[in-house]
Amino acid sequence: MREALGMSPVEEGFVAIGWHELGDLKAIAPSREAFKAAAAAALPNRKPGAIPGDAGVLYRFSVEMKPGDIIIFPCKVDRQVHIGRIAGPYTHQPQAGHWPNRRKVKWLKALPRASFTQTALHEIGSAITLFRVTTHADEFLAALSGDTPIPAEQDEVSAEEVSAQVEEGTEDFIIKRLKNGLSSYDFERFVGHLLTCMGYHARVTPPSGDGGVDIIAHRDELGFEPPIIKVQCKQMLSNHGRPEVAQLIGVLGQGEHGLFVTLGGFTPEARKFEQSKHNLRLIDGVALVELIFAHYDKFEPRYQVLLPLKRTYVPAPVSSGN
């Protein structure tokens, strides 16, 4: 299941799809042909070749899906793969605007994308809104039961092969390399090097006894001129909450700034805390990858070997309006 609905489906326990133009899908006879006819009538500007696909998604969502079925939701907001179980029948909620077609879900587990092989991530990254996972179904079921084996070398090679074609695959590849190819201290050194490439002077603190500060960065060579930036690095794929972020604020002196860098993400509470602090910046895995793209040409050879990338242009996705 793919849908750009932010985190509300997970927080509120549901999944939803669009096609609000068709109204309540229970009013359509439960057959694929009836759904095709209804979609064609409700979407006159839709290309005829797209109607069967739209009708198939609507039919599967409202008729075929049954309570107890397993559902997978790769969320772009927190970069977690959420796995749940359908907990109720189809309902139509017109007050939900463009996303009125809903099913209740009991979300059972959330795992970082890096917990899965790249080919499995590609399968659930289909452009189709709703589809049956077949090739890698066993991998996702194993993850649900607590068994998530990762053939690391094979998986990274697969990511390299597709990184020039799929932007999301490139992000996965970079995050996995930074997670599996570096020690925690080497990751701090990498972030320090990235800051150097951005024009800062960065000093990585010793591995222990740093009081939660892994890097001290500043614009001038001696580090006397403000602002002083204290950086905390977490080579983790999970989400960080407000308490962790608040600890960094606690070690800042007058006029100092805090930067929290992680391969994972941040909870909504942590993001709200960031918004309330003018001297705090949170960099999650996606933002870190964007900085790597922006400054990659300044990287030392050892880091370009760690992250072998090349500039490639790919077609931008075209929204269907649903």
Image (spheres, rainbow, N blue to C red):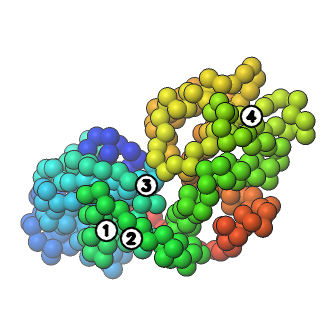
Binning the other alpha carbons within 10 Å of mark 1 as few (below 14), some (14 to 19) or many (20 upward) gives some
Compared across the picture, whether 106 is left or right of 249 comes to left
Binning the other alpha carbons within 10 Å of mark 3 as few (below 14), some (14 to 19) or many (20 upward) gives some
Looking at the rendered image, the quarter that the C terminus falls into is bottom left
Name the residue: 76% across, 23% down: 255
Judged from the image, the secondary structure of the residue bearing numbered disc 1 is helix
Binning the other alpha carbons within 10 Å of mark 2 as few (below 14), some (14 to 19) or many (20 upward) gives some
Labelled disc at residue 229: 4
Looking at the rendered image, the quarter that the N terminus falls into is bottom left
Name the residue: 32% across, 45% down: 10
Q: Which residue is mark 3?
A: 112
Q: Return the x and y of residue 262 as percentages of the image width and height.
A: 57, 46
The amino acid on which the numbered mark 1 sits, given as a three-letter code, is Glu
Q: Return the x and y of residue 108 as percentages of the image width and height.
A: 26, 49
- Counting residues from the start of the chain, the first of labels 4 and 3 encountered is 3
Question: Which of 237/26 is in front?
Answer: 237
Judged from the image, the secondary structure of the residue bearing numbered disc 2 is helix
* Closer to viewer: mark 2 or mark 1: 1
Alpha carbons under labels 1 and 4: distance apart: 42 Å
Q: Residue furthest left?
A: 29
Q: Which residue is mark 2?
A: 120
Alpha carbons under labels 2 and 4: distance apart: 39 Å
